[in-house]
Image (cartoon, rainbow, N blue to C red):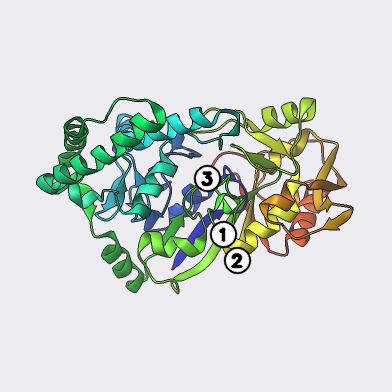
């Protein structure tokens, strides 16, 4: 059985907790796209962990964690994260695709320089090198993991590509050229340590599917950051959709049985782009503090807003949702009244379908206000024990989305969950 755990919004929905929880009954957890530009926070009996590249099944001894073909593998960040787990007494099983591509030091450099050049028109990048990485991948001047073990080939390609990159550095950014030997030596320092983890992960995963193993595909970010379906150009540079997970992992598109789309009980967003439900002032401050809404990777304050049914319904559709996991419901416990965005007003008309970016930029929220429950619900694990108004809020969201809310998260810990 293959399940995909993906985000329905702008990212940061709580996917790490859901993956950590469902990994208990799984054999394999797969990261299939993205890099260290976003993080998943998990809290369990071993402590609190902020993961960026490693799959969220690393705390289980029985789980094999896979870095798939589609991942942007930053070796410095990968081993820093891995070593932190080892230092805390956790020894995860990890395998890495020989076809995954390497995040190069100059990708990060170009990302930082371009955001600085754009100034107030920047994309709100995490400056982790993601856009330059994927640009090189599709321009076919990237480097696969397998090339680490062919040093002569690697050095020759590095020399050619660094010559090309240095021309851009000088002409556009007035920066000194790259030193290919320095980059080569940097990669070689990681190569031998990585080698025992590297294999043909597609063959491994296809064999696991044939054997009936339980596999979780872990997405990064959310549907509204998808490069094709999201709020372009304020997106990531890969696809965080469940449909892409089979490509990024190398298994059949027919293999996925469940798509669990994780959404927050309110909205949050890191980075630039249209965010129709956005709050400001005191309301934003109170919601941000109640939800501890700061980026796991960047530490930046997240933009926050009320639950956006228009955007979330679209995100669930794009993901091919079979089940919704609603997280951080407990964060709203301080409110006596809870607004929900049920439509957008644009040019005097109310729309309920999520529009393309130029129209989205002109939209204003249409609000419906529900009664809050105004009491602490953290840790409740039975549906019937939730306050009546809390149940009504969840049922309202379920009806507005048109997808079943199967999981309700009532706190940060693994066991703080209601299964409906």
Give the number of the disc on residue 129: none
Does residue 81 appear in the picture of this structure? no
The quadrant of the rendering that contains the N terminus is bottom left
Does residue 29 appear in the picture of this structure? yes
The residue identified by callout 1 is 260
The answer to whether 258 is drawn above or below residue 15 in the figure is below
* Residue plotted at (78% across, 25% down): 282
Give the number of the disc on residue 322: 2
Q: Do the residues labelled 2 and 1 touch (CB within 8 Å)?
A: yes
- Sequence-earlier tag: 2 or 1: 1
Q: What element carries label 3?
A: helix
Where residue 340 sits: x, y (%)? 80, 47
Q: Is mark 2 on a helix, strand or loop?
A: loop
Left or right: where 83 falls relative to 359: left
Q: How many labels does the image show?
A: 3
The residue identified by callout 3 is 17
The answer to whether 84 is drawn above or below residue 210 in the figure is above
In the figure, residue 156 lies in which quadrant?
top left
Q: Distance between the residues labelled 2 and 1?
A: 6 Å
Left or right: where 366 falls relative to 134: right
Q: Which of 196 and 343 is in front in this view?
A: 343
Q: Which residue lies furthest to the left in this view?
A: 152
């Amino acid at each position: 059985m293959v399940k995909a755990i993906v985000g329905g919004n702008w990212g940061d929905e709580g996917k790490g907790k859901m993956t950590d929880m469902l990994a208990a009954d799984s054999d394999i957890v797969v990261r299939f796209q993205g890099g260290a530009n976003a993080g998943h926070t998990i809290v369990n009996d071993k402590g609190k962990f902020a993961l960026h590249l490693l799959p969220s099944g690393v705390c289980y001894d029985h789980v094999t964690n896979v870095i798939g073909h589609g991942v942007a593998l930053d070796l410095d960040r990968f081993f820093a994260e891995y070593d932190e787990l080892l230092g805390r007494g956790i020894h995860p099983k990890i395998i890495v695709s020989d076809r995954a591509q390497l995040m190069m030091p100059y990708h990060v450099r170009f990302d930082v320089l371009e955001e600085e050049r754009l100034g107030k028109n920047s994309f709100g990048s995490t400056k982790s090198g993601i856009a330059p990485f994927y640009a090189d991948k599709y321009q076919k001047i990237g480097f696969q993991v397998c090339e680490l073990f062919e040093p002569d080939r690697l050095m020759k390609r590095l020399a050619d590509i660094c010559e090309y990159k240095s021309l851009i550095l000088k002409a556009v950014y007035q920066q000194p050229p790259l030193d290919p030997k320095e980059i080569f030596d940097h990669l070689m320092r990681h190569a031998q340590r990585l080698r025992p983890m590297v294999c043909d992960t597609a063959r491994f995963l296809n064999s696991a599917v044939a054997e009936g193993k339980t596999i979780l595909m872990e997405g990064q970010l959310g549907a509204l950051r998808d490069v094709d379906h999201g709020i372009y150009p304020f997106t990531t540079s890969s696809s965080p959709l469940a449909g892409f997970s089979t490509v990024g992992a190398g298994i059949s598109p027919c293999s996925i049985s469940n798509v669990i789309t994780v959404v927050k009980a309110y909205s949050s967003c890191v980075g630039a782009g249209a965010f129709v439900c956005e709050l400001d002032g005191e309301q934003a401050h109170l919601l941000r503090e109640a939800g501890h809404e700061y980026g796991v990777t960047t530490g930046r304050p997240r933009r926050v807003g009320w639950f956006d049914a228009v955007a979330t319904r679209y995100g669930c559709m794009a993901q091919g949702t079979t089940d919704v996991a609603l997280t951080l419901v407990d964060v709203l416990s301080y409110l006596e009244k809870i607004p929900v965005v049920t439509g957008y007003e644009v040019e005097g008309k109310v729309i309920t379908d999520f529009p393309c970016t130029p129209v989205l930029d002109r939209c204003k929220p249409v609000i419906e206000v529900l009664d809050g429950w105004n009491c602490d619900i953290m840790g409740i694990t039975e549906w019937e024990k939730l306050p009546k108004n809390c149940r009504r809020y969840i049922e309202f969201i379920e009806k507005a989305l048109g997808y079943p809310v199967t999981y309700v998260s009532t706190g940060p810990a693994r066991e703080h969950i209601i299964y409906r």
